[in-house]
Image: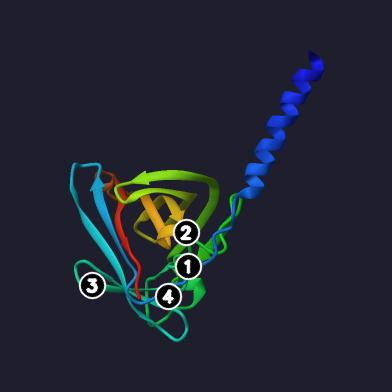
Amino acid sequence: MKNDARFCVLAIVMSVGAMAHAQPAMEKPDYVVGDKWQYAWSDGDGQTGRRAWEIVEISPEGRLLIKYGSGKTDTFDGAMNFIPDASDPRPERTLKLVAYPLKVGDEWTFKREFAGPNSAETITGKFVAYEPVTVPAGTYNCYRNEASSSQTNKQNKLNRKWIRWYCPEVKGYAKMILETQTYTPYNPASNTTKVETFELTKFTAGK
């Protein structure tokens, strides 16, 4: 009986190890102009809507110009990390939430620089699982990333938490949950917490 129990334990350990080893690393997507993501959006206050992102230009340096459904555009780096100031695209100014290739267990801490000396932000993240996720567009095997940031200046503190499911089939995330907390020491009554959810409804690959 003891030998049977030991065999069962060994089999389970070997099975878990094989599953972990079988998980492929997600390489950086080969983005092209025309790649488009459409999401169903909701927040904790009962508001719902649609959101869309489309790559409309790729610079020689590999930066991506993204157009939203509203027509507004923003610049992102080659890994789809937001660049707040397109005139200063240095990595230390970028909101770094992902770096490829993606592997379960990868984690990082990143301190983002600002133009002014009175602001600071620290970002931490980790890929915690490789798992299926179901959204309106379908079911995909994805890498779940959990990241958080704390941004401070003289007047406010902004805390954010992201959970994103990055999926090779859709060149990005199929689902995102974003929690934003705003804290104002001088006016506690204005403190807010907002939770937004984005679920992919359609991915269209560019040509």
Foreground disc of the pair 4, 3: 3
Mark 3: amino acid: Lys
Question: Going 81% across and 19% down the picture, which residue do you hit?
Answer: 3
Q: What whole-number distance in Å separates the C-alpha atoms at marks 2 and 3?
A: 26 Å
Name the element at disc 1: loop
Precedes in sequence: disc 2 or disc 3:
3
Which residue sits at x=65%, y=37%?
16
**Secondary structure beneath label 4:** loop
- Residue in the foreground of this view, choosing between 79 and 47: 79
Q: Residue furthest top?
A: 1
Could you say where residue 144 lies in the image, as x and y percent from the top left? 48, 48
Report, in whole angstroms, how far the alpha carbon at label 4 lies from the one at label 3: 23 Å
- Mark identifier at residue 168: 2
Amino acid carrying label 4: it is Ala
| CB under 8 Å between discs 3 and 1 | no
Q: Position of residue 161 (x, y in %)?
A: 41, 49
Quickly name the residue at label 4: 115
Crowdedness of circle 3 by 10 Å Cα count: few (<14), some, many (20+)?
few
Check disc 3 and report the residue beneath it: 72
